[in-house]
């Protein structure tokens, strides 16, 4: 039993050291990645106004677009249908996005 306990303690210690090393590696790696992401967001202009983009927005042009049954918002499974937008345009609905209820369509027509 004592040798089993010793084995377990050694194993747990080794695992802790490995996890610690992994955490340090992830931390160093993430800092590097974050810097690259911030740089990319700054140089990608908003598709609407040209300001630095902070988000990605569906352009509403996917022929196979999906609709969220809970929110009624349309979205696309095709990442190519997303364009960079700034904070001011991130919440704006795409021009081709029609409201789900027909009443608004009648009012618009
Ligand atoms: Zn914009």
Image (spheres, rainbow, N blue to C red):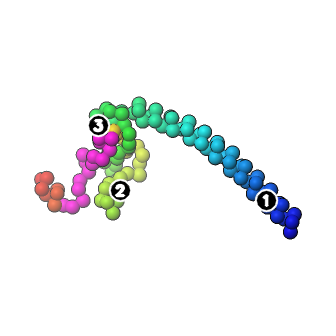
Q: Pointer 3: residues within 10 angstroms few (<14), some, or many (20+)?
A: few
Kindly identify which residue carries mark 3: 48
For the residues carrying marks 3 and 1, which lies nearer the camera in this image?
A: 1
Residue 4: x and y in percent read 84, 65
Kindly identify which residue carries mark 2: 66
Residue at (68, 48) in percent of width and height: 20
Magenta region, residue range = 87-102
Task: Give yes or no for residue 67 being in the magenta stretch.
Answer: no
- Ligand 1, what quadrant? top left
For the residues carrying marks 1 and 2, which lies nearer the camera in this image?
A: 1
The disc at residue 44 is none
Dot 2 falls on a residue whose secondary structure is strand
Q: Pointer 1: residues within 10 angstroms few (<14), some, or many (20+)?
A: few
Q: Choose the circle earlier in sequence order: 3 or 1.
A: 1
* Depicted 24 relative to depicted 102: above or below: above
Residue 1: x and y in percent read 86, 69
Q: Do the CB atoms of the residues marked 1 and 2 lie less than 8 Å apart?
A: no
Mark 3: is the Cβ under 8 angstroms from ligand 1? yes
Q: Quadrant of residue 88?
A: top left
* Depicted 61 relative to depicted 100: above or below: above
Q: Do the CB atoms of the residues marked 3 and 1 lie less than 8 Å apart?
A: no
Give the distance between the C-alpha atoms of the residues marked 3 and 1, in whole angstroms.
60 Å
Dot 1 falls on a residue whose secondary structure is helix
Residue 46: x and y in percent read 33, 36
Q: Pointer 2: residues within 10 angstroms few (<14), some, or many (20+)?
A: few
Residue at (27, 48) in percent of width and height: 93
Q: Choose the circle earlier in sequence order: 3 or 2.
A: 3
Task: Give yes or no for residue 89 being in the magenta stretch.
Answer: yes
The disc at residue 9 is 1
């Amino acid at each position: 039993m004592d040798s089993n306990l010793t084995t377990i303690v050694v194993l747990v210690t080794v695992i802790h050291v490995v996890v610690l090393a992994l955490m340090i590696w992830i931390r160093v790696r993430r800092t590097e990645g974050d810097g690259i992401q911030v740089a990319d967001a700054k140089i990608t202009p908003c598709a609407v106004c040209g300001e630095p983009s902070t988000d990605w927005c569906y352009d509403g042009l996917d022929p196979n677009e999906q609709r969220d049954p809970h929110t009624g918002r349309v979205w696309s499974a095709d990442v190519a249908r997303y364009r960079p937008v700034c904070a001011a345009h991130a919440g704006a609905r795409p021009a081709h996005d029609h409201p789900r209820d027909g009443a608004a369509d009648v009012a618009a027509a």
